[in-house]
Image (spheres, helix red, strand yellow):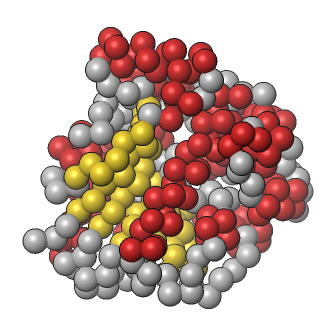
Amino acid sequence: MDDLSIKSLGTIPETLLIPLAARMTAPDRHPDLQFRDAEAMRIGTALGFDPARFARDTGSMRGSVLRAQWFDRITETFIASHPAGLCVSIGSGLDDRPSRIRLPATVDWVDADFADVVRLREALVARRANVRTIRVTETEPLAWMDELGWTPGRPTLVLAEGVSMYLLPSVGENLLRGLVDRAARNGALLELAADFASPIMVRQSRRNPSLAKTRASFRWAVPRPETVGDIAPGLAVIEAVDITRRCGALARTMASLHRLLTGRPVYFCGHYRFRPR
């Protein structure tokens, strides 16, 4: 597959190349994290993608790996507790998380992404009997939720890694409410894992060295972990982690200063749970 496939990616889908570069280069650039993703290297090579485009942005690369590890842990913990559950990954990009966590056959997995990304996934990502893909459209960005096949009482984990900040605020808020509404109607436990950018991070997004090499910018800001529950009542914070504190001295200093001045994280990964009544 030639480089034209990369050039055909839309504005937001193009950003999938940033975490792909991070996963490809992690063993050499960040050996202390002990992160290896053989599928990322295979997929990147087949795509003809040179991770050097982003690899010099040490902060973003390290942060992407730390974020992937956090999402992996949340997923593995959910599966251990709910071995017949449903996992839904929004904006999966070219991340083959099922291979990395060794997804058991008892769990159903759904990847949801834009059509141009789905075409790449279908060509590059290994197929599995319990994994399927749903296309997301820009005209109806939340229609995919009705295609999941919600089963009454079935625990569901929704992952949104590197997604929220690219959404329009109205779409992001409706996504949260829509997930809770469907879980409530199905009497099902819902867990959500997502990362969120602060207002200042959204305003300054084009200053990010990696994002500046794409055509995208951040749009939706969530100031604090508890805001998610304010938007979608019933979603309770289980864990919130400020990954920037582990992304090097500069990022740690900026994150600490922001928290000191505002009392809020500059960026965080949040794990939430909704229990139906």
For image coordinates 30% across by 39% down, the residue present is 225
For image coordinates 25% across by 85% down, the residue present is 152
**Above or below, comparing residue 274 to residue 55 in the picture:** below
Image quadrant where one finds the N terminus: bottom right
The answer to whether residue 15 is visible is no
Residue 188: x percent and y percent?
25, 76
Say which of 79 and 187 sits in front. 79
Res 196 → quadrant: top left
Residue 150: x percent and y percent?
33, 80
Say which of 87 and 248 sits in front. 248
Res 249 → quadrant: top right
**Above or below, comparing residue 89 to residue 217 in the picture:** below
For image coordinates 55% across by 45% down, the residue present is 67
Furthest residue toward left: 277
Image quadrant where one finds the C terminus: bottom left
Q: Is residue 119 left or right of residue 134?
A: right
Residue 19: x percent and y percent?
66, 45
Q: Is residue 129 left or right of residue 187?
A: right
